[in-house]
Amino acid sequence: MERNYDAIVIGTGVSGGWAAKELCEKGLKTLVLERGRMIKHVEDYKTANKEDWDYPSGDVITQEIKKNQPIQSRTGYVNTESTKDFFVNDLEHPYNEKKRFDWIRGYHVGGRSLLWARQSYRMTPFDFVANKQDGYGVDWPIRYKDLEPWYDYVENYIGVSGENLNLNQFPNQKLLKPMELNCVEKVLQKSISKNYQNRHMTIGRVAHITEGTKPGMGRSNCQYRNRCRRGCPFGAYFSSNSSTLPAADATGNMTLRPNSIVYEIVYDEFKNKATGVKIIDSETNLTYEFNSKIIFLCASTVPSTSILMQSKSKRFPNGLGNDSGELGHNIMDHHFQIGADGSFDGFHDKYYTGRRPNGIYIPRFQNIGGKTNTKDFLRGYGYQGGASRTDWSEYVKEASYGEKLKKAITEPGDWIMGLNGFGEVLPYHENKMYLNYEKTDKWGLPTVTFDASIRENELNMRKDMQKQAMEMLDKAGFKDIKPMESSYGLGLGIHEMGTARMGRDPKTSVLNAFNQMHSVNNLFITDGSCMTSSGNVNPSLTYMAITARAVNYAVKELKNNKI
């Protein structure tokens, strides 16, 4: 077993896959470590071609699933019969909640790149200066222009479909042809354009190929099956398994080792370097140590921060790189599950083709300057959602037999339009995670405790998210408009971030402008833990761009003997 490498990548999700690809393509012999099991593209997507009726209870979250995955089941939709094996068993992977925190995760090669919602938006110039302007958190050490060419780079590689609108608050991207809005969504789009000066509605921008092909394992056009969380046999959406890991493997420079739980990054205080990592083999419980010149920590926000906290030494008694005391603090997410829906009386002769794996998007329109600025809350939000026809099931009680039932099951119901707000969470120092060494997991490692919640700014924003959704639907002529709000705890957005943030000052941050640890210059962290603020858009595209940029810098520094 080889123990020495040029680089080690911890994690195989969105960030880890990109780190592996870029390092390997630049000629570095790279060990890629994944704590979960192997998932091979196509052959391990066991449910990709099954139908709902192939499951005794239909493709739902059953009571048996809830027993083993009580936390994963809080979403109400992710871990159904067809997808449950991609999510952790909560009984085997416990954690602690001082305040409710929904930690939704899967441990396997590919990580959440197999499970994400594929919404792919750039953060805006507003986002990179927000902290400096309003005083929350610390100033980003980069600006939009620093990341812009890397956004271009990753978008061209992964394939993102959508429509450019030439808006400052919604930057243009390198896009493939957009998916189509349906007839009812177009009604709302037209109404928003007519009634509002600063509001726009478009189709969502998603990492789905809609024309041509992209690099990887046979990546081709989206088939509109909307079975994405089962794994896509066509490679139509971006995942590490179909795209970046095959590219890394093709170089001959990657060694992929699943079932490898990293529990410590080894620090040499005489060299002031990270010299390698220690792992537990989850199948044998044997421990191993691997060495490298540089390390990319991309295990996902909470695991990455946990590894740093566990990596204690005389130099770093409070966790590796934690001179600032900020490690584990400033945890963020996006808050959602609030908005409105309404029915539309019309287009009874219209339907849609296929199962579009995407919805509409309304970019941020509050606090972007001039009359849009409000005193009620800082930052902003967007909307995701869509229109569809209800099915026959609502009629079953009334039409349980005979002619009425036959009619009900052959005719779709009314059109329903839903708008779900998606808002920014501020970086509060008080929102944190820490380790509990008294309550350990099955490998004897400490468990995580979460102490974080949304606060007054987010609560005020949520009121506006609901109000504006109802108003937009009303102006477009929708009927039976109902406010929507479901219970929400941090984590439910599945965008946890911020616990090892970038910054300009080592006294208030963990990483510099190139995701390099201030105090250990051969360690880079490019997953969600590096985020300085959350913005209000899905963050995965930003992680990819940040990772590609950081690898480019790290390899140059290594070759120039500066690391």
Image (cartoon, rainbow, N blue to C red):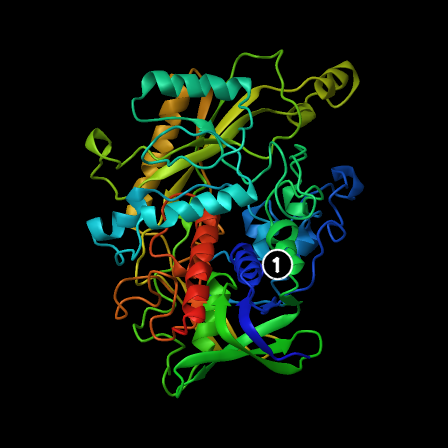
Q: Is residue 383 visible?
A: yes
**Left of 165 or right of it: where is 394?**
right
Mark 1: amino acid: Ala
Q: Nearer the viewer, residue 214 or 540?
A: 214
**Left of 525 or right of it: where is 3?**
right
Q: Residue at x 58, y 51 (%)?
A: 113
Q: Residue at x 31, y 66 (%)?
A: 509
Quadrant location of the N terminus in the rendered image:
bottom right
Quadrant location of the C terminus in the rendered image:
bottom left
Instruction: Identify the residue under disc 1.
Output: 248
SS label for mark 1: helix
Q: What percent of the width, then of the height, locates residue 260? A: 63, 72
Q: Residue at x 62, y 56 (%)?
A: 245
Q: Residue at x 40, y 35 (%)?
A: 172
Image quadrant of residue 68?
Answer: bottom right
**Left of 542 or right of it: where is 64?**
right
Q: Is residue 99 visible?
A: no
